[in-house]
Amino acid sequence: MLLIRRRAGESILIGEEIEIQILEVAPNRVKIGIVAPPSVPVMRKEAHLTRQQNQAAACTPDTDALAQLVKKLTVFSLEKAKKQDENNPKIT
Amino acid sequence: MPQVHTKYFGFLEYMPDNLYDFPAGIPGFEENKQFLFIDQPVTKPLVYMQSLTDPGLCFVALPILCVDPEYRLHIGPEDLKLLRCAADRQPRIGDEVLCLALLSLAEQQPPTVNMLAPVVVNLKTRTGLQAIQIDTEYSHKQEVPCS
Protein backbone atom coordinates (compact mmCIF):
# COMPACT_ATOMS: atom_id res chain seq x y z
CA MET A 1 0.00 0.00 0.00
CA LEU A 2 1.21 3.46 -0.87
CA LEU A 3 1.15 5.90 2.06
CA ILE A 4 0.99 9.64 1.50
CA ARG A 5 0.64 12.36 4.14
CA ARG A 6 -1.61 15.23 3.08
CA ARG A 7 -3.10 18.32 4.71
CA ALA A 8 -6.50 19.91 4.15
CA GLY A 9 -6.51 21.70 0.81
CA GLU A 10 -4.04 19.29 -0.78
CA SER A 11 -4.90 16.54 -3.22
CA ILE A 12 -3.79 13.31 -4.84
CA LEU A 13 -4.08 12.24 -8.47
CA ILE A 14 -4.81 8.67 -9.53
CA GLY A 15 -4.07 8.35 -13.23
CA GLU A 16 -5.02 11.30 -15.39
CA GLU A 17 -8.67 11.59 -14.51
CA ILE A 18 -9.19 10.89 -10.84
CA GLU A 19 -8.46 13.45 -8.16
CA ILE A 20 -8.87 12.96 -4.42
CA GLN A 21 -9.09 16.26 -2.56
CA ILE A 22 -8.62 16.47 1.19
CA LEU A 23 -11.16 19.13 2.14
CA GLU A 24 -11.29 19.06 5.91
CA VAL A 25 -9.49 17.20 8.67
CA ALA A 26 -11.22 16.79 12.04
CA PRO A 27 -10.05 14.73 15.02
CA ASN A 28 -11.90 11.57 14.05
CA ARG A 29 -12.91 12.01 10.45
CA VAL A 30 -11.83 13.60 7.19
CA LYS A 31 -13.92 15.16 4.48
CA ILE A 32 -12.80 14.06 1.03
CA GLY A 33 -13.80 15.33 -2.39
CA ILE A 34 -13.52 12.98 -5.34
CA VAL A 35 -13.36 14.07 -8.96
CA ALA A 36 -13.79 11.15 -11.33
CA PRO A 37 -15.33 10.42 -14.74
CA PRO A 38 -18.95 9.18 -14.62
CA SER A 39 -17.79 5.74 -15.75
CA VAL A 40 -15.94 5.20 -12.46
CA PRO A 41 -18.27 4.07 -9.67
CA VAL A 42 -17.44 5.79 -6.38
CA MET A 43 -19.01 4.49 -3.20
CA ARG A 44 -18.37 3.99 0.47
CA LYS A 45 -16.86 0.58 1.11
CA GLU A 46 -19.76 -0.30 3.45
CA ALA A 47 -22.19 0.27 0.57
CA HIS A 48 -20.18 -2.06 -1.63
CA LEU A 49 -20.10 -4.75 1.10
CA THR A 50 -23.84 -4.38 1.64
CA ARG A 51 -24.53 -4.75 -2.08
CA GLN A 52 -22.42 -7.94 -2.21
CA GLN A 53 -24.06 -9.26 0.94
CA ASN A 54 -27.54 -8.55 -0.46
CA GLN A 55 -26.69 -10.45 -3.61
CA ALA A 56 -25.61 -13.43 -1.50
CA ALA A 57 -28.72 -13.10 0.68
CA ALA A 58 -31.03 -13.03 -2.35
CA CYS A 59 -29.87 -16.42 -3.61
CA THR A 60 -30.28 -17.86 -0.16
CA PRO A 61 -31.82 -20.77 0.81
CA ASP A 62 -34.07 -23.61 0.24
CA THR A 63 -36.82 -24.22 2.75
CA ASP A 64 -35.00 -27.18 4.34
CA ALA A 65 -32.01 -25.04 5.30
CA LEU A 66 -34.41 -22.45 6.72
CA ALA A 67 -36.33 -25.06 8.70
CA GLN A 68 -33.06 -26.27 10.23
CA LEU A 69 -32.12 -22.76 11.20
CA VAL A 70 -35.51 -22.15 12.80
CA LYS A 71 -35.07 -25.34 14.83
CA LYS A 72 -31.61 -24.26 16.00
CA LEU A 73 -32.87 -20.80 16.93
CA THR A 74 -35.77 -22.25 18.90
CA VAL A 75 -33.58 -24.70 20.79
CA PHE A 76 -31.03 -21.94 21.43
CA SER A 77 -33.58 -19.51 22.85
CA LEU A 78 -35.16 -22.24 25.03
CA GLU A 79 -31.75 -23.16 26.43
CA LYS A 80 -30.96 -19.52 27.05
CA ALA A 81 -34.22 -19.06 28.94
CA LYS A 82 -33.47 -22.22 30.95
CA LYS A 83 -30.00 -20.95 31.87
CA GLN A 84 -31.50 -17.65 32.98
CA ASP A 85 -33.99 -19.50 35.16
CA GLU A 86 -31.18 -21.50 36.72
CA ASN A 87 -29.23 -18.34 37.45
CA ASN A 88 -32.25 -16.60 38.94
CA PRO A 89 -34.15 -19.35 40.72
CA LYS A 90 -37.71 -18.44 41.48
CA ILE A 91 -38.60 -18.37 45.16
CA THR A 92 -41.65 -20.49 45.72
CA MET B 1 -57.78 -8.31 -2.12
CA PRO B 2 -54.68 -8.01 -4.31
CA GLN B 3 -52.43 -11.03 -4.70
CA VAL B 4 -48.67 -11.38 -4.80
CA HIS B 5 -46.65 -14.21 -6.30
CA THR B 6 -44.13 -15.18 -3.61
CA LYS B 7 -40.90 -17.15 -3.72
CA TYR B 8 -41.73 -19.46 -0.82
CA PHE B 9 -45.51 -19.50 -0.42
CA GLY B 10 -46.99 -19.44 -3.93
CA PHE B 11 -49.74 -16.84 -4.40
CA LEU B 12 -50.73 -14.91 -1.28
CA GLU B 13 -53.44 -12.34 -0.74
CA TYR B 14 -52.25 -9.26 1.09
CA MET B 15 -53.67 -6.13 2.63
CA PRO B 16 -52.45 -2.99 0.83
CA ASP B 17 -51.65 -1.71 4.34
CA ASN B 18 -48.93 -4.37 4.62
CA LEU B 19 -47.03 -3.01 1.64
CA TYR B 20 -43.94 -0.90 2.34
CA ASP B 21 -42.29 1.59 0.00
CA PHE B 22 -38.56 1.53 -0.57
CA PRO B 23 -38.11 4.61 -2.78
CA ALA B 24 -34.45 3.77 -3.46
CA GLY B 25 -34.83 -0.02 -3.44
CA ILE B 26 -31.96 -1.66 -1.59
CA PRO B 27 -28.30 -1.84 -2.72
CA GLY B 28 -28.00 -4.29 -5.62
CA PHE B 29 -31.79 -4.37 -6.13
CA GLU B 30 -32.59 -0.72 -6.75
CA GLU B 31 -35.47 -1.47 -9.13
CA ASN B 32 -37.53 -3.23 -6.43
CA LYS B 33 -39.39 -0.42 -4.71
CA GLN B 34 -42.14 -2.23 -2.81
CA PHE B 35 -41.85 -5.09 -0.35
CA LEU B 36 -44.21 -7.11 1.80
CA PHE B 37 -43.12 -8.50 5.16
CA ILE B 38 -44.44 -11.98 5.81
CA ASP B 39 -44.06 -13.97 9.00
CA GLN B 40 -45.31 -17.48 9.47
CA PRO B 41 -45.94 -19.00 12.91
CA VAL B 42 -44.00 -22.17 11.99
CA THR B 43 -40.86 -20.28 10.99
CA LYS B 44 -40.87 -17.73 13.77
CA PRO B 45 -38.73 -15.62 14.32
CA LEU B 46 -37.88 -15.43 10.60
CA VAL B 47 -39.40 -12.61 8.57
CA TYR B 48 -39.69 -12.88 4.78
CA MET B 49 -39.16 -9.70 2.79
CA GLN B 50 -40.89 -10.35 -0.53
CA SER B 51 -40.54 -8.04 -3.52
CA LEU B 52 -43.93 -7.11 -4.96
CA THR B 53 -42.67 -6.96 -8.53
CA ASP B 54 -40.20 -9.87 -8.63
CA PRO B 55 -41.61 -13.17 -7.30
CA GLY B 56 -38.10 -14.64 -7.26
CA LEU B 57 -36.75 -11.98 -4.92
CA CYS B 58 -37.43 -12.70 -1.28
CA PHE B 59 -34.97 -11.94 1.48
CA VAL B 60 -35.09 -13.79 4.75
CA ALA B 61 -34.44 -11.67 7.81
CA LEU B 62 -34.34 -11.73 11.59
CA PRO B 63 -35.62 -8.97 13.86
CA ILE B 64 -32.42 -7.22 14.88
CA LEU B 65 -33.20 -7.34 18.61
CA CYS B 66 -33.56 -11.08 18.28
CA VAL B 67 -29.91 -11.24 17.16
CA ASP B 68 -28.66 -8.63 19.62
CA PRO B 69 -31.05 -7.33 22.30
CA GLU B 70 -28.59 -4.48 22.97
CA TYR B 71 -28.49 -3.28 19.34
CA ARG B 72 -28.31 0.49 18.95
CA LEU B 73 -29.23 2.27 15.74
CA HIS B 74 -26.76 4.79 14.26
CA ILE B 75 -28.64 6.06 11.22
CA GLY B 76 -27.02 8.94 9.34
CA PRO B 77 -28.84 12.28 8.90
CA GLU B 78 -29.58 11.68 5.20
CA ASP B 79 -31.19 8.31 5.85
CA LEU B 80 -33.23 9.74 8.75
CA LYS B 81 -34.58 12.31 6.32
CA LEU B 82 -35.42 9.69 3.69
CA LEU B 83 -37.19 7.65 6.37
CA ARG B 84 -39.03 10.80 7.45
CA CYS B 85 -37.96 10.21 11.05
CA ALA B 86 -37.10 12.96 13.55
CA ALA B 87 -33.66 14.37 12.68
CA ASP B 88 -32.45 15.03 16.23
CA ARG B 89 -32.50 11.49 17.62
CA GLN B 90 -32.46 7.84 16.63
CA PRO B 91 -35.90 6.22 16.19
CA ARG B 92 -37.06 3.61 18.68
CA ILE B 93 -36.96 0.03 17.40
CA GLY B 94 -40.34 -1.61 17.87
CA ASP B 95 -42.82 1.22 18.19
CA GLU B 96 -41.42 3.69 15.64
CA VAL B 97 -39.42 1.54 13.24
CA LEU B 98 -39.20 -2.07 12.24
CA CYS B 99 -35.56 -3.12 12.12
CA LEU B 100 -34.47 -6.33 10.42
CA ALA B 101 -31.10 -7.94 9.71
CA LEU B 102 -30.90 -9.72 6.34
CA LEU B 103 -29.81 -13.32 6.54
CA SER B 104 -27.29 -15.14 4.33
CA LEU B 105 -27.17 -18.91 4.33
CA ALA B 106 -24.35 -20.36 2.28
CA GLU B 107 -23.71 -24.08 2.18
CA GLN B 108 -21.06 -25.37 4.60
CA GLN B 109 -20.95 -22.00 6.34
CA PRO B 110 -22.59 -20.74 9.49
CA PRO B 111 -25.59 -18.46 8.85
CA THR B 112 -24.74 -14.76 9.03
CA VAL B 113 -26.74 -11.54 9.30
CA ASN B 114 -25.89 -8.04 8.12
CA MET B 115 -25.82 -5.91 11.29
CA LEU B 116 -23.92 -3.09 9.57
CA ALA B 117 -26.82 -2.33 7.25
CA PRO B 118 -30.20 -3.29 8.74
CA VAL B 119 -33.44 -2.80 6.84
CA VAL B 120 -35.30 -0.04 8.67
CA VAL B 121 -38.97 0.80 8.08
CA ASN B 122 -40.83 3.78 9.48
CA LEU B 123 -44.06 2.18 10.69
CA LYS B 124 -46.00 5.44 10.51
CA THR B 125 -45.09 6.48 6.96
CA ARG B 126 -44.53 2.91 5.69
CA THR B 127 -41.27 4.02 4.09
CA GLY B 128 -38.17 1.89 4.31
CA LEU B 129 -34.54 1.65 3.32
CA GLN B 130 -31.41 -0.29 4.10
CA ALA B 131 -29.58 2.02 6.50
CA ILE B 132 -25.81 1.63 6.46
CA GLN B 133 -24.89 2.51 10.04
CA ILE B 134 -22.33 5.24 10.62
CA ASP B 135 -19.54 5.28 13.20
CA THR B 136 -20.26 1.75 14.38
CA GLU B 137 -18.34 -1.47 14.39
CA TYR B 138 -21.23 -3.78 13.60
CA SER B 139 -20.32 -6.41 11.02
CA HIS B 140 -21.91 -7.00 7.64
CA LYS B 141 -21.37 -10.72 8.29
CA GLN B 142 -22.18 -11.50 11.90
CA GLU B 143 -22.77 -15.11 12.80
CA VAL B 144 -26.29 -15.83 14.00
CA PRO B 145 -26.10 -16.77 17.68
CA CYS B 146 -27.69 -20.21 17.59
CA SER B 147 -25.06 -22.70 18.69
Image (cartoon, coloured by chain):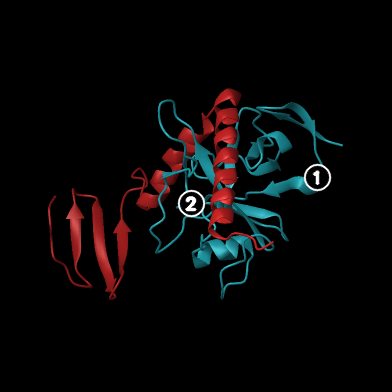
User: Which element type, helix, strand or loop, lies under badge 2?
Assistant: loop
Chain identity of mark 1: B
The colour assigned to chain B within the rendered structure: cyan
Q: In this view, does B71 lie to the left or right of B94?
A: left
What label sits on residue B16 in the rendered view?
1
Which residue is disc 2 drawn over? B117
**Residue for point 58% across, 37% down:** B59
Residue B139 locus on image (x, y percent): 40, 50
Vertical order, B2 against B124 (above or below): above
Say what amino acid the circle numbered 2 marks: Ala
* Image depth: mark 2 or mark 1 in front: 2
Which of B94 and A23 lies nearest the eye of the viewer? B94
Which of A75 and B14 lies nearest the eye of the viewer? A75
Residue B16 locus on image (x, y percent): 80, 45
**Residue for point 53% across, 43% down:** B102
**Residue for point 64% across, 60% down:** A90
Pointer 2 and pointer 1: residues touching (CB < 8 Å)?
A: no
- Give neighbour class at mark 2: few <14, some 14-19, many 20+ (Cα, 10 Å): many
Toward which corner of the image does residue B93 lie, by quadrant?
bottom right
The colour assigned to chain A within the rendered structure: red
- Give neighbour class at mark 1: few <14, some 14-19, many 20+ (Cα, 10 Å): few
Which of B38 and B3 lies nearest the eye of the viewer? B38
Exactly how many numbered labels are in the figure? 2
Toward which corner of the image does residue B50 lie, by quadrant?
top right
Say what amino acid the circle numbered 1 marks: Pro
Disc 2/disc 1 C-alpha distance (Å): 26 Å
Chain identity of mark 2: B
**Residue for point 52% across, 30% down:** A60
